[in-house]
Amino acid sequence: MWDAVGVLRPALIADGLADLQVRSSNVPIVFCETRQLAEEWTYRFLAARAWAETEDTAPQRIAPAEADATDLADAPVASEPSTAEVRAWARAHGITVPDGGKLRLEIWDAWRVTHPG
């Protein structure tokens, strides 16, 4: 592990980084400018990981919230389609529309007449 001078072998460090990357692949490898910054980052990471493993409510607090069926029932109904949808509808009904940009007001009015509510 240590050489005769007391320096850690670079191959051991590379192996350790590879092991950590395999075990925790979603954690980025961070290269810091100084040893002090690297140690600080490492201690913060290890403390956060120890806290997350020992605290029971950590996964619920960190995980993304799931939408309940009641949340979706209270959601507002989409009032209007996208411009691309109205453009496709207009072309399907033989109305000439530009390839891009805003649609003329009469195109939107025609869509609203055929799609009440």
Image (cartoon, helix red, strand yellow):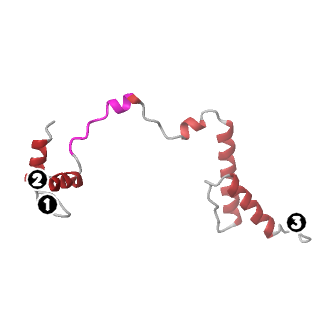
Cα separation, mark 3 vs mark 2, equals 77 Å
Q: Tag 3, which secondary structure?
A: loop
Give the residue pinned by disc 3. Answer: 2
Q: Please, is residue 56 above or below residue 102 in the view?
A: above
Q: Which quarter of the picture shows residue 28?
A: bottom right
Q: Main secondary structure of the magenta part?
A: loop
| Callouts 2 and 1 close, C-beta under 8 Å | yes
- Rendered image: mark on residue 107: 2
Residue at 16% from the left image edge and 36% from the top image edge: 117
Instruction: Out of 25 and 46, give the one closest to the viewer.
Output: 25
Q: Earlier in the sequence, mark 2 or mark 1?
A: 1
Q: Tag 2, which secondary structure?
A: helix
Instruction: Out of 10 and 48, give the one closest to the viewer.
Output: 10
Q: Please, is residue 84 above or below residue 75 in the view?
A: below
Give the residue pinned by disc 1. Answer: 97
- Rendered image: mark on residue 106: none
Q: Start and end of the magenta stretch?
A: 70-80
How many other residues sit within 10 Å of disc 2, few (<14), some (14-19) or many (≥20)? Answer: some
Position of residue 47 in the picture relative to residue 79 (left or right): right
